[in-house]
Image (tube, rainbow, N blue to C red):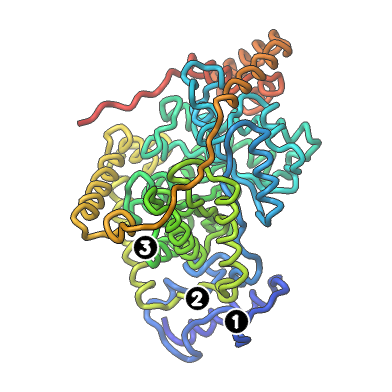
């Protein structure tokens, strides 16, 4: 890029920066030295390839979505939490918000994630472990008791039964008296990554895509600020993928959901801003920063050039980050505080929009109050003490970071081409990327490549080529055993008792009629969300709703592969 084009870009950035709202804060170093809001080539200088780097707030958004960076607003501290019953988790949420958290993120227990009630035989021994138990809308009311859903953004990490859980969230907000059209938050709903990595599905892919399409339509029309899809790379990376695989599989899934929206006749400029992303931040500091920068650039280019988006917000890749759970070690667990801080800093320097920091004891159990507070304070130290919020994309122009960004982007593009090839050359019901994803799921293409990457890394660990402190090097320690959070069996007994009381107190005929009506709508082209909301209002349980749809659509079983 020649000097005139670079200088013109700087002038555009300056005009947008001057017009934007900035925080009332001290933007100097610890020693009091003023710093500029962004840095770039000197005036009058040429910089080959600068169009791929650019300025913050300008296409291709390599350097971030906003001209102000974090001077405009910092990332949202959104701590993932959930355990036991709704009342116990509600107390943790109030602690997080009271300690400075800016949003909530709900972790559900395994029965809820699989669309099972707490009294289901398959739920035995799992209720309230690894997340909160939610059986009915009344549980959702208790989960957010005393928390204004109209005033806080809430993320819910659930995919298989995401739509009925979302309906319970809406009914809880209704019962608070909230204006549903003004709700803001994120529902994961990403079923592709379940088949690729996490394995928490209910049905075959096609019925899930039907529900997701209905949700996209409903939110676009009724709750425009709400993001009905958070396309997740986190679980792909936790399953053992490389950084480039995480990026490519996640963005390919995102392209599939864009194709789903277009196949429903939706305007990409209207629904694409409702798509958000969820990435892992692993411990290789610069690789992760490059991954995040490449993600924004790829998404903007594909949305504009492949899918025809024209509005700026439709080109924006907004993402939440969680530090890498798989990097935590049971050995010398206090070291996990350091790992989490490094990973969180990588996410921030990569321009994350919100962030969860893992607690030091999460490889052993759900976090205690103390370890949860340390995780929260880790973000606050980064935000308040380090100066990383003062300059937008401070590593932009680094030879190393830019080379890594380009390399990860090139690897991702090669993977996109292979996925599209899997879909074949013929007509595609939803779109070519979606067809390739579905074929890759059916053939085990994704799981095979992730397994191979995980195997290669494990070999490197066992040979000592890759190091993990406390595991295969520096193993001596004076650390004492941690006190961990334990979920009492009484939680499950109480949840089952309360559920039985609710079932006996409700209007059983109204529940049956509402669930039947929902199934009837599933047999048509009509949107299922209103009928599902009616079933939830009648206090139909999550298991009853999901079982009715299992009876209609069947269940999915992953093919055996050797």
Q: Residue at x 65, y 36 (%)?
A: 88
- Real-space Cα separation, disc 2 to disc 3, in angstroms: 18 Å
Left or right relative to 401: residue 220? right
Near-viewer residue (423 or 29): 29
Q: Residue furthest top?
A: 509
Q: Position of residue 47 (x, y in %)?
A: 40, 83
Q: In the rendered image, which residue does mark 2 sit on?
A: 394
Callout 3: helix, strand or loop?
loop
Q: Quadrant of residue 439?
A: top left
Q: Residue at x 42, y 87 (%)?
A: 46
Q: Position of residue 279 (x, y in %)?
A: 46, 52
- Real-space Cα separation, disc 1 to disc 3, in angstroms: 27 Å
Q: Residue furthest bottom?
A: 44
Near-viewer residue (218 or 234): 234
Report crowding for label 2: few under 14, some 14 to 19, many 20 or more residues within 10 A (C-alpha). some
Image quarter (top left, top right, bottom left or bottom right) of the C terminus = top left
């Amino acid at each position: 890029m020649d000097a005139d084009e670079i200088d013109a870009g700087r002038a555009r950035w300056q005009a947008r920066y001057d017009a934007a709202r900035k925080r009332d804060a001290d933007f100097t170093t610890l020693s009091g030295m003023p710093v500029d809001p962004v840095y770039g080539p000197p005036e009058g200088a040429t910089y080959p390839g600068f169009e791929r780097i650019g300025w913050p707030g300008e296409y291709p958004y390599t350097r971030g979505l906003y001209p102000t960076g974090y001077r405009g607003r910092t990332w949202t501290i959104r701590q993932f939490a959930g355990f036991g019953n709704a009342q116990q988790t509600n107390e943790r949420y109030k602690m997080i918000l009271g300690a400075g958290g800016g949003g909530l993120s709900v972790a559900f227990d395994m029965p809820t994630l699989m669309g099972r009630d707490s009294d289901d035989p398959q739920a035995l021994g799992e209720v309230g472990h690894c997340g909160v138990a939610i059986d009915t809308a009344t549980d959702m009311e208790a989960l957010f008791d005393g928390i204004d859903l109209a005033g806080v953004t809430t993320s819910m990490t659930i995919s298989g039964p995401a739509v009925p859980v979302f309906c319970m969230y809406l009914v809880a907000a209704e019962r608070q008296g909230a204006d549903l059209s003004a709700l803001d938050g994120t529902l994961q709903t990403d079923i592709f990554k379940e088949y690729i990595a996490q394995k928490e599905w209910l049905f075959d892919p096609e019925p899930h895509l039907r529900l997701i399409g209905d949700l996209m339509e409903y939110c676009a029309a009724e709750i425009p600020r709400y993001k009905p899809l958070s396309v997740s790379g986190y679980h792909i990376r936790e399953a053992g993928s490389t950084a480039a695989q995480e990026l490519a599989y996640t963005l390919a899934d995102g392209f599939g959901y864009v194709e789903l929206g277009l196949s429903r006749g939706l305007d990409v400029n209207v629904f694409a801003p409702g798509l958000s992303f969820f990435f892992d931040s692993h411990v290789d500091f610069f690789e992760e920063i490059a991954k995040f920068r490449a993600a924004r650039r790829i998404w903007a280019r594909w949305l504009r050039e492949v899918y025809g988006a024209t509005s700026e917000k439709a080109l924006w890749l907004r993402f939440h980050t969680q530090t890498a759970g798989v990097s935590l070690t049971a050995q010398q667990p206090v070291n996990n505080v350091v790992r989490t801080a490094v990973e969180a800093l990588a996410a921030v320097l990569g321009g994350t929009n919100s962030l969860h920091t893992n607690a030091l004891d999460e490889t052993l159990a759900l976090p205690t109050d103390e370890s949860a507070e340390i995780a929260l304070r880790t973000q606050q130290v980064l935000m308040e003490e380090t100066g990383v919020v003062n300059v937008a994309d401070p590593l932009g122009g680094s030879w190393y970071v830019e080379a890594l960004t380009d390399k990860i982007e090139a690897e991702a593009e090669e993977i996109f081409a292979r996925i599209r090839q899997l879909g074949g050359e013929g007509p595609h019901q939803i779109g070519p990327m979606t067809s390739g994803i579905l074929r890759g799921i059916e053939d085990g293409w994704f799981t095979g490549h992730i397994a191979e990457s995980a195997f290669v890394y494990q070999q490197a660990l066992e040979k000592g080529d890759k190091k993990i402190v406390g595991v295969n090097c520096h193993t001596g320690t004076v650390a004492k055993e941690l006190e961990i959070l334990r979920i009492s069996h009484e939680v499950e007994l109480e949840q089952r008792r309360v559920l039985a009381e609710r079932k006996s107190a409700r209007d059983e005929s109204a529940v049956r009629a509402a669930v039947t009506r929902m199934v009837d709508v599933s047999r048509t082209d009509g949107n299922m969300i209103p009928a599902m909301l009616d079933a939830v209002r009648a206090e139909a349980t999550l298991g009853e709703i999901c079982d009715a749809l299992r009876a209609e659509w069947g269940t999915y079983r992953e093919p055996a592969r050797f």
